[in-house]
Image (cartoon, grey):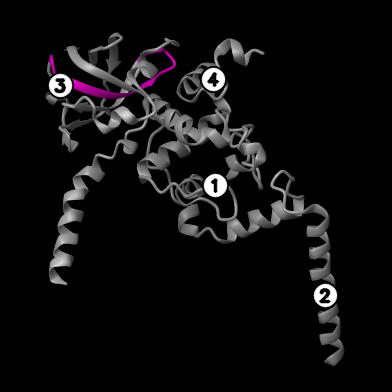
Amino acid sequence: MKRIILALCTTLLLASPAFAHDPKLHKGPKVEGKVVSLKGDHLEVATKDGTVSVTLSPETKYEQGATGEQATKSALKEGEHVMVVGHKLESGEIAASEVMVHAESGHPHDHDAHSHADAGGSGN
Amino acid sequence: MRRSWAILTVIIIVLAGSGVLYLRVHGLSARAKPTALEEWLARRVRDLATPTSVRTATNPIRPTELVLAEARDHFADHCAVCHGNRGDGKTMLGEGMYPPPPDLGREPTQSLTDGEIMNIIRNGIRFTGMPGFGGSDEDNWKLTLFIRHLPKLSDRERAFMNEINNLEGKPNEADH
């Protein structure tokens, strides 16, 4: 019996980081690609459909790695693979609410309803 | 005393009989519209079931442009399928619900407190189509801000929502 309880606890503990990084918790259209440049609050991301410009703000949250560890803006470097949850403002610019650094390709986020094309598409 | 019981019994029988007759005639179609009495009663019951602490809770999030845009996209993704991008409930699912979703941009939704709106998003309303989404308080407060913003929703914002959910079809389709 003790073994079963121990196994259950271990499973739950191991499952927690995955739950914390549940893709459903990241809402909104995504911009995915490599960081081309970061100048002040302006981040340029090379996506498969071209370069997309994203605006960072003090409200932007940063995560790092597959388990979604909390990070800061300093984690953003040229060449890093990022996934940005961006939202179009009335001006047409895309503002980032979340930036996930080192977000792996084929990550669960990819199954979400929106690709980077949603944020970088028409309407700008 | 015996007379009072007899009157009460007759009232109960008449009420039960009326209820059965009403059901036989009108059925349980979800396409019907709730009567004014039903609507009034349902709102009173909901008010009674809302604790004061919930009603008086204040929104800790400021309505910045990014917060509203984030909540708008969240709403477009999870809520608009029933409520519509305008929040008026004029969608295929919304129009077939009993009770139908209210027009969120108008009274009586706009007269609810922030705490009441947030509570409805988080816990839903039993016996209606409104599910309890749970979720994080932060997201729910942001959605509350967006519901407050609905009366001022611009065409451009609606177009951004439509890019996410395509509820209103492509721009030239929507014109027809």
Label 4: how many Cα within 10 Å (few below 14, some 14–19, many 20+): few
Q: Secondary structure at mark 4?
A: loop
Q: Residue B171's image quarter?
A: top right
Q: Marks 2 and 3, Cα distance to the nearest angstrom?
A: 73 Å
Vertical placement of A26 versus A16: above or below?
A: above
Q: Which mark is residue A76?
A: 3
Callout 2 amino acid: Ile
Whether labels 2 and 3 share one chain: no
In this rendering, the answer to whether A8 lies above or below B166 is below
Q: In the rendered image, which quarter is residue A77 located in?
A: top left
| Residue that badge 4 annotates | B154
Q: Which residues are magenta?
A: A78-93
Q: Residue at x 17, y 38 (%)?
A: A67
Residue pointed to by mark 1 = B130
* Type of amino acid at the residue the image marks with label 4: Ser
Q: Write down the chain letter for disc 2.
A: B
**2 and 3 marks in contact (CB < 8 Å):** no
Callout 2 crowding tier (Cα within 10 Å): few <14, some 14–19, many ≥20: few
Q: Secondary structure at mark 3?
A: loop
Q: Are marks 1 and 3 on the same chain?
A: no
Q: Pointer 2: what residue? A: B13
- Residue B133 position within the rendered picture, expressed as x and y whole percent measured from the top left: 44, 46
Tell me the chain of label 1: B
Q: Residue at x 29, y 16 (%)?
A: A54
Q: Is residue B165 left or right of residue B8?
A: left
Q: With respect to residue A16, does B147 lie above or below?
A: above
x, y (%) of residue B97?
64, 43
Circles 3 and 4: CB atoms closer than 8 Å: no
Q: Is residue B70 visible?
A: yes
Which of the two residues, B83 or A33, is positioned nearer the viewer here?
A: A33
Bin the neighbour count of mark 1 within 10 Å (Cα to Cα): few under 14, some 14-19, many 20 and up: some
